[in-house]
Amino acid sequence: MNFKKEINKDFYLRDTHVENIFINEYMPQAPGNYVKVYLFALMYADFDKNMTNETIAKHLGMEDEDVLKAWTYWEKLGVIRKHFIKPGDKFHYQVEFINLKGLVYGKKSKARKQDSKVPDRLKGLMDNKDIKKMYSRIEQITGRLFEGNEPMEILSWITDYNATPEMILYAYSYCVKKKGHSNHKYVAAVVKEWANQGLKTAEQIEDYLEEIDNRHYLYKRVLRALGLLRNATEEEKRIMDTWFDQMGFTIDRVLEACKKTTGISNPNINYINTVLKAWSSGNERTSSNKGETGSGYIARVMRYYEELRARHEAEAEERRAEVYKNIPRVREIEEETRNIGLQISKIMLSGTNDVKSKIKAMKARIDRLNAEKAFLMTENNFTIDYMDLTYDCPLCKDTGTLDTGGRCSCFAEKLKNIQKTD
């Protein structure tokens, strides 16, 4: 007598075994999409079916790049092992699911070897649950895996700067949302600055940022009143701080002083400082403000620039629509060029050995597309730069301010013309 069980050949009606160690130890800290990739592929592990990363991405409604990141994440934790089909091809490989009970309980010597690389001052933090949660939240905030020694450097912020996990999470969120940065070295500078200010909690940080933003707003108001479309230098900030903190002037009073620069060809913070110092000492007159009316000429010039730029942008959009209507292929070329640019960024993130050759081929494709676009434009009696944005003044691009931060020569000319008309 022998025994056997009926085998259901429809794998959708069968069960997938998931180790409890995975559920308890690995799943809570992992990004949700990475867990989806792991479980979906695990379902196919017992069947002889061809399953590519592209197919997984399609089934799960994800980008191909996110599936690649998921396998890199699990490989880093030792949960899976990659077996590459061709040496040097980082995109195509077989995935072996590791027995997690053996990983946790049967490889202590390897774990001790890895622990020896961790500095003694950081070892006590490695198994802290709050730290693990912090790591998971950081990866969710940044949308990427950790870079190199980033986890160790984050721990060093806690020991060196006396930073808290709450502060570090807020710093990553702040840098990503407000500054567009997720590089840990950039975040480290922010954490260090906040730590030097004695900040610990999110509430303290928010109060600090609100104060900074309010002062930044005042800086921008003053520079704009002077017709300068740039950020204040550190020295200019120091001078303006004395107006508000030491002399006790309101922003309205400072802007009134800015109006005294109407007849000056190159107004600056130092001149305003002279005026306010005189006012602070009780002397409302200076040798330079005689005959000045403060009638808002600068504001009128800045409005002129804004209207000029808006008109040029609308004209460029009309020209672009005209070209697309007459030569639909031009729109296709531009869309294909943008897509290739996205593919180049994706390949750069993949870390394959042949990145340079692939990027070179894609850039060559872009060059051919641009050549085709130029040919189509000229063949249809359009200049190559017909769709480009134009400027009345190419030096300042119709802003009145040069890249160096100084006034453009066209600003003084427009200011003079407006004064003549009054």
Image: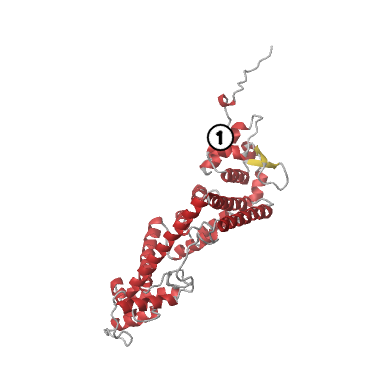
From this view, report whether residue 4 is shown above or below residue 181.
Answer: above
Q: Where is residue 45 in the image (x, y as percent from the top left)?
A: 63, 32
Secondary structure of the residue carrying tag 1 is helix
User: Residue at (60%, 21%) from the top-left corner?
Assistant: 8
Comparing 181 with 153, the one in front is: 181
User: Residue at (31%, 71%) from the top-left corner?
Assistant: 251
Residue 149, by quadrant, is: bottom right
Whether residue 124 is visible to the viewer of this picture, yes or no, is: no
Q: Position of residue 116 (x, y in %)?
A: 64, 53
Q: Which residue lies furthest to the top in this view?
A: 1
- Amino acid type of disc 1? Asn
Comparing 361 with 315, the one in front is: 315
Comparing 390 with 197, the one in front is: 390
**For residue 2, side relative to residue 248 (left or right):** right
Locate the C terminus and report the quarter of the image it occupies. Answer: bottom left
Residue 118, by quadrant, is: bottom right
